[in-house]
Image (tube, helix red, strand yellow):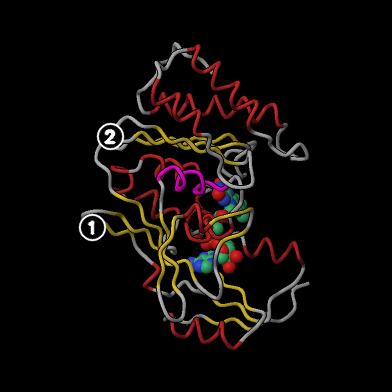
Amino acid sequence: MFNPFVYKRPNNLEQVFTLLDQNEDVKIIAGGTDLLVKLREADRSPELLVDIKDLEKLKGIKKNKNEIKIGALTTITEIKESKLIKDEFDALYQAASQFGCYEIRNRATIGGNVVHASPGAEFGVVLFALNAEVEVVGKRDVKRMPIKEFLYDVGSVKLNNELLKSIIIKNKPDLKSSYHRISRVKGMDLALVNAALVKDDKAQYTSYFGAVARTPYNNNKVDELLSQSNLNKALFVKIQKIVDESISPRATSLRASPEYKKKMVVSLLKKCLRDIGEIGDDIDG
Ligand SMILES: Cc1cc2nc3c(=O)[nH]c(=O)nc-3n(C[C@H](O)[C@H](O)[C@H](O)COP(=O)(O)OP(=O)(O)OC[C@H]3O[C@@H](n4cnc5c(N)ncnc54)[C@H](O)[C@@H]3O)c2cc1C
């Protein structure tokens, strides 16, 4: 049973930080699609629930000369429907398209997805592969850090009475990217394994895989091989060997065995490469 709690919906950051200062047992809620499930599972309510949906400063997708800024409160539907995202960051568009179902996409926010920091979350791998940064706002200042520093463990991000304000991705000319996932139930399940691949204008690849480690997983050797070799069948045998030897997915996962996940890593990598036109159908898997 949920205990009675107080619900506040401030419309500016000052009020949020005052509430955070004055109360010990507070939870921030954005779309609520992770938080409410978590509270129900824990069978408890915080004393105070602070709904941040009215904070205009955390909304919108904006582009300037050097970068694109996605407000933490941007919903998955807004990302899916953004022409800017679709034109420039295919992987983000694909992640938003494969995410949950219509109703969940309308409520869930990209900020909530990052802060919840689930190993198989849609946006973790994509934002790591794009080398994104985050803006964190506190009572006194706004600081910026790489997402790889911000999201450092399962369910753990660097926030201390602060809010995630936005996600920033550098504009790069001729960047190609792709995202794919495998899940048991289309749309209503987290990924069993997911993968994001980026190829920059210097033909350097960056790949990240989710749900195979505590945070999005990258192996430099795989990226180097992709960047320096012919993308043929023999190369993928080598990559599979590296993956088999270097990744140790949890053996206790109820979703899939470690062996299956390792095979799927390479299969999804090929799917991403096919997407961006780097390999054809002659390379199977
Ligand atoms: C049916 C269903 C299907 C789902 N499918 C998917 C899926 O396909 N892929 C996927 O990745 N996830 C999925 N999810 C999980 C969830 O929808 C996402 O992780 C979502 O993006 C969370 O965003 P939210 O706005 O709802 O976060 P909330 O639940 O509101 O918050 C999540 C956490 O982040 C904190 N928080 C939120 N915003 C901020 C902020 N700006 N600053 C500081 N802290 C913040 C909250 O305090 C809370 O701890 C699904 C969930 C359900 C119920």
Quarter of the C terminus within the rendering:
top right
Secondary structure mostly seen in the magenta stretch: helix
The residue shown at (24%, 40%) is 173
Q: Dot 2, crowdedness within 10 Å: few (<14), some or many (≥20)?
A: few
- Queried whether the magenta region covers residue 234, the answer comes back as no
188 over 219 or under it: above or below: below
Where residue 125 appears, as percent x and y from the top left, is 50, 44
Q: Earlier in the sequence, mark 1 or mark 2?
A: 1
The quarter of the rendering in which ligand 1 is drawn is bottom right
Q: Give the number of marks.
A: 2
* Mark 1 vs ligand 1: CB below 8 Å: no
Q: Of 45 and 160, which appears nearest the observer?
A: 160
Residue 271 horizontal side relative to residue 85, left or right: right
The image quadrant that residue 200 belongs to is top left
**Residue ID for mark 2:** 201
**Residue ID for mark 1:** 64
Magenta segment:
121-130
Q: Of 187 and 201, which appears nearest the observer?
A: 201
Q: Which mark is residue 7?
A: none
Residue 41 horizontal side relative to residue 60, left or right: right
Q: Of 119 and 243, which appears nearest the observer?
A: 243
